[in-house]
Amino acid sequence: MSKFWYDLKIYFFKYRAYLVGSIGILALLISGIVYLNTPKIPVTEEEFNHALHTGKKLFDAHRYTEAYKVLIYPAEKGYPLAKYLMGEIYHDGKGLKANYKQAAENYFAVMNELPQAKYRLAQMVLHNQTDLVDKEKAVNLLAEAAYSGYVLAQKDMGAFSLLSKDYEQAYFWLSVLDNNDNDDIKKARDFSKARISEYQVNLLDVEIQGFIDRNKNLSINE
């Protein structure tokens, strides 16, 4: 045995208690760090609400992997916003591999609570990303989301109606959106207006104003 290995052996036996103790302390420290960074599983209603609030903040900060680890608990508990955000994570592959099946199921579960979930599910169906509902149902969901004040759905309804040459519906939705000061929307609205009678325009203007008055506090952009 060389002198090096002999000295190393003597050193180990002499200080092994210190070495073992140091390794034990290091292992405890690592375990403590892992524990502190592992999201606590919520039990009470207050803890589920806290998890939802924390997960939403992480999601908004684009920290999607961390958001997923927190939101999964209130989502499994049935919290609508948590399930919607989980749908967003699965659909766009935010922090994990995209999974259209999981995305569609999350949107479907809360579509009656959140118009944005209706919109996202409808978009998935119309883009052939899921067949969880048929395309006729998807169009109805899109319209329901628009009537609920979801701006993206209103834009799509305006474009869809214009492409379908349903100029009355196009004029309706594009007029609702005209408050956004978008030149393209104004041009499309005027294009639709020119293709319906003055009588129809007058009737629609009354309907549009009533819709805007009823929904002025319901506009949803997210």
Image: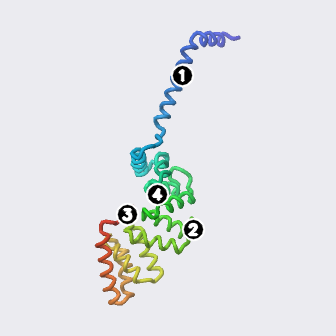
Label 3 or label 4, whichever lies nearer to me, is 4
Indicate which disc residue 24 carries.
1
Q: Measured along the vertical axis of the image, is residue 67 above or below residue 13? A: below
Query: Which residue occupies 45% across, 64% down?
Result: 112
Q: Is residue 64 visible?
A: no
Q: What's the residue type where badge 3 is placed?
A: Asn
At 39% from the left edge and 67% from the top edge, which residue is drawn? 150
Above-or-below relation of 2 to 185:
above
| Disc 1 to disc 2, C-alpha distance | 55 Å
Please tell me which of labels 2 and 3 falls first in the chain.
2
Residue 119, x across and y down, in percent: 46, 66
* Residue type of the residue flagged with mark 4: Tyr
Cα separation, mark 1 vs mark 4, equals 44 Å
Give the labeled residue for mark 3.
221
Among numbered discs 4 and 2, the one appearing first in the sequence:
4
User: To which residue does mark 2 refer?
Assistant: 128
Q: Is residue 43 above or below residue 166?
A: above
Residue 48 place in picture, x, y as percent: 43, 47
Q: Quadrant of residue 199?
A: bottom left
Q: Quadrant of residue 178?
A: bottom left
* Mark 2 residue element: loop
10 Å neighbourhood of mark 1: few (<14), some, or many (≥20)? Answer: few
Q: CA distance from mark 3 to mark 1?
A: 53 Å
Q: Which mark is residue 84?
A: 4
Answer with mark 1 or mark 4, whichever residue precedes in sequence: 1
Q: Pointer 3: residues within 10 angstroms few (<14), some, or many (20+)?
A: few
The x, y position of residue 117, in whole percent, is: 46, 63
Look at the image and name its color scheme.
Answer: rainbow
Q: Secondary structure under badge 1? A: helix
